Amino acid sequence: MSEKKRYFIENIWYAAAWEYEVAETENKLARTICETPLVFYKGKTDNYIALDDRCCHRAAPLSIGRVEGNCIRCMYHGMLYNENGQVVEIPGQVRVSKSLKVRSYPVVAKGGMIWIWMGDPELANENDIYDFPPLSDKVNWRGFDKGAYLHYDANWLLIVDNLADFSHVAFVHANTLGGSEAYAYSTQAENIQKGEDGFSMERWDRDSASPPFHAKVIPNEELGNTVDRANIIQMRLPGVFLMETLFTPVGWKEKDGRENVREYRNCQFMTPETRNTTHFFWNYLHNWEIDNSAISASLKESLLEGFMEDKVFIEGQQKLLERSPDFVPRSIAADEAFAHFRNKWGRRLRAEDEANPLAHKENKRTIL
């Protein structure tokens, strides 16, 4: 019996899908998370269910099956699975063994996002999900009509690294999200707070011109004014990025109130598909002129343009790292936040290894 290596924390909530993704695929969706093929489907009581996407009979994908109430039927030989993954009907066979089953997973929907717990169901507590209130607040906040999705051919921690060091905004996004290379020289991370599940920090760019994405959606009379710009960031395990962005009058203090402040809320969820590929979910919300759909459309276009700029670098890193496994990175001062994040990730991973070591078992009944 040989040891297996653990690559993913299991006892934690992962962003799995936007609810509309399930609705748009006949109420069932195939998605691989942490190298586990899964099928998500919506039951008759509007509950979401997640099972291993592999019939226990001959490994046919359940995701090409048929939803029947709270069950899903494998359309290869007709075996019917209930929401707990148990086979409850086999056409032409009276007795159904309790050994005929697949694994089911705890799932919760919040703010339009479906979350999945990949570990011990007894430890799953939906209050541990890093819910993002603006996603559910349709009165005060306006986001995209549909939450956005991107697929990265890169490890999710490379995306975390990218978001943890905003100095890249000055160079990668000089003409989109950043505004100029001066941002990297005139600003730095402030008030870094380190916790067991991640970090938070702020970055202020004072008395500067509005970056292009913001300038596109503000009135012309404001364009000639410089502003103070704040990005207030939280990054939580396993890959939850939440950001409050403020554009304020120069010299603004919190005690001045937010009447003349333009505010945005940014959420990004990075979920490992495999060790080398990532599901990336995101939305960008604002709390002014929320009836003006053109603002959301412009912000989505600008943010997507910026993310595609990131994607070039991140996927390029992935390719080079795969070709050079002996590469040793050199650290700089700006690495402080994501170094802490990776340290906490590694500790959680080792703790799960110690509590429940993975072991390879020889399969004596292979099909292939």
Image (cartoon, rainbow, N blue to C red):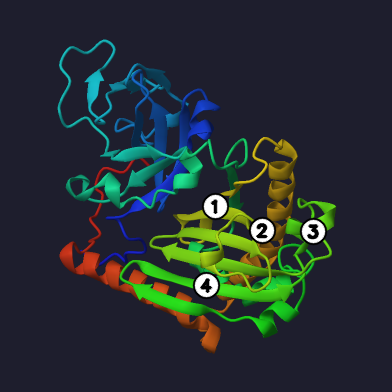
Instruction: Give the residue type at disc 2.
Output: Phe
Asked if labels 2 and 1 touch by Cβ distance under 8 angstroms, the answer is yes
Instruction: Residue at the far front: name it.
Output: 256
Instruction: Give the residue type at disc 1.
Output: Phe
Which secondary structure lies at badge 3? helix
Circle 3 packing at 10 Å, graded few (<14), some (14-19), many (20+), is few
Q: Is residue 147 visible?
A: yes
Residue 48's tag is none
- Which quadrant holds residue 252? bottom right
- Which quadrant holds residue 162? bottom right
Q: Disc 3 vs disc 2: which is toward the camera? A: 3
Which secondary structure lies at badge 4? strand
Q: Which residue is mark 3?
A: 222
Location of residue 213 in the rendering, given as x and y in whole percent from the top left corner: 74, 57
Location of residue 44 in the rendering, given as x and y in whole percent from the top left corner: 36, 18
Location of residue 254 in the rendering, given as x and y in whole percent from the top left corner: 52, 66
Asked if labels 2 and 3 touch by Cβ distance under 8 angstroms, the answer is no
Q: Earlier along the polypeptide chain: callout 1 or callout 2?
A: 1
Question: Which residue lies at the image location 17% right of the left edge and 46% below the top edge?
Answer: 122
Circle 2 packing at 10 Å, graded few (<14), some (14-19), many (20+), is some
Q: Which residue is mark 2?
A: 307
Q: Which residue is mark 1?
A: 280
138 or 359, nearer to the observer: 138
Residue 202's tag is 4
- Which quadrant holds residue 96? top left
